Image (cartoon, rainbow, N blue to C red):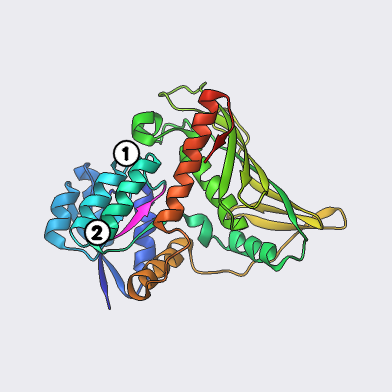
Amino acid sequence: MAYKVAIVGAGGIAVSHLEALRRMERLTAVALADISRERADSVAAEYGISAYTDYKEMIEREKPDIAVVTLPHFLHKEASLFAAARGCHVMLEKPMALNAAECDEIIEAVRIAGVRLMVGHTQHYIAHNRAAKAIIEAGTLGTLVMINDVRHVPYYRDTRPAWFFEKAKAGGGIFMNLGSHSVDKIQWLTGSRIAQVKASVSHYGTKGDIEGSGIAWLRTESGIPATISQSGYTVVPRNETELIFTGGMLKLATSQGLWISEDGKYVEVPVSKEAPPFVLQYRDLIRYIEDGVEPSSSMEYSRSVVAVVESMYRSSETGAEQRV
């Protein structure tokens, strides 16, 4: 079966989706919508599809089989509910919603509508991450005893849209936008949900009311401790996850490389090239629609990521450890 796809939102990530759709034999992008007429027309012209400024009108007219929601976080719930109610399957960008309560509303609406929704947690589809997970599951390095995840990036750059810096619209700052990737990575690599959180954030940014840095201590349900350290101020960019085992170590630099310890030093692990993450993601969505095989980034799983980030914020506000 072939599927018509409509893109809701024409920001930068929408282009990644459109490029992936070009490579999918059974998926065809037919339209996109963005409140900026100029942006909608420009991207639509590049991909030979129809342009709209109202996503609701687009869905009503085009009647796509799949709606790809790439809107600001505060619009994720509204757009997902609208698309599902009109019989569209949904590919929803992360985070799933502003909070766990909104995630619950989405889950209920999707189930009532009888459609499928998955969230775009691309950490599951990056080749280096998949290779690291295979090593962990093989058990060759012994027992996993801790994880340290570090992400430093200039967060307040001018290319970010204004809503990124408004807590009411983004749900938070660096922890909600990038910390959700780290939470997801830890949970997915270990196959264990995060159960406890102790965190602290800072607000020294030059824009908005969101946090610009944070550090968190976490423990998974299986007892593995982990730390997440992130800063968006004036930094030396870094994106690394170090995993310490009883019999060695792994260092994962997402989309850059994977290294394993050998005789007291790191040696790079050769990683086979795979299809791009967004293509693999769409393959999982098709499998979910046609065969009912729930993807690893299911609605319930994706809700858990948002719930952890919420717990991180509560911990910072109260000064106390939080159960997720």
Mark 2 or 1, closer to the camera? 2
**Label 1 element class:** helix
Name the residue located 39 percent from the left edge and 55 percent from the top edge. 299
Mark 2 neighbour density, 10 Å: few (under 14) some (14–19) many (20 or more) = few
Magenta span includes 315: no
Q: Amino acid at mark 2?
A: Ile
Q: Is residue 63 above or below residue 234?
A: below
Question: Could you tell me what secondary structure mostly forms the magenta stretch?
Answer: strand
Residue span colored magenta: 88-94
**Which x, y percent locates residue 164?**
39, 34
Name the residue at 19% across, 50% down: 55
Check disc 1 and report the residue beneath it: 74
Residue 165, given in percent of the width and then of the height, sits at: 40, 29
Q: Which sits in the foreground, 317 or 268? A: 317
Q: Is residue 236 left or right of residue 121?
A: right
Three-letter amino acid code at disc 1? Answer: Phe
Circle 2: element type: helix
140 sits to left or right of 80: right
Taking the spot 52% from the left edge, 47% from the top edge, the residue there is: 181
Front one among 242 and 31: 242
Determine contact: label 2, label 1, CB under 8 Å.
no
Q: Position of residue 224 (x, y in %)?
A: 68, 49
Direction bottom: furthest residue: 1
Q: Is residue 77 visible?
A: yes
Left or right: where 291 falls relative to 175: left
Q: Which residue is disc 2 drawn over?
A: 112
Residue 69 seen from this side: no
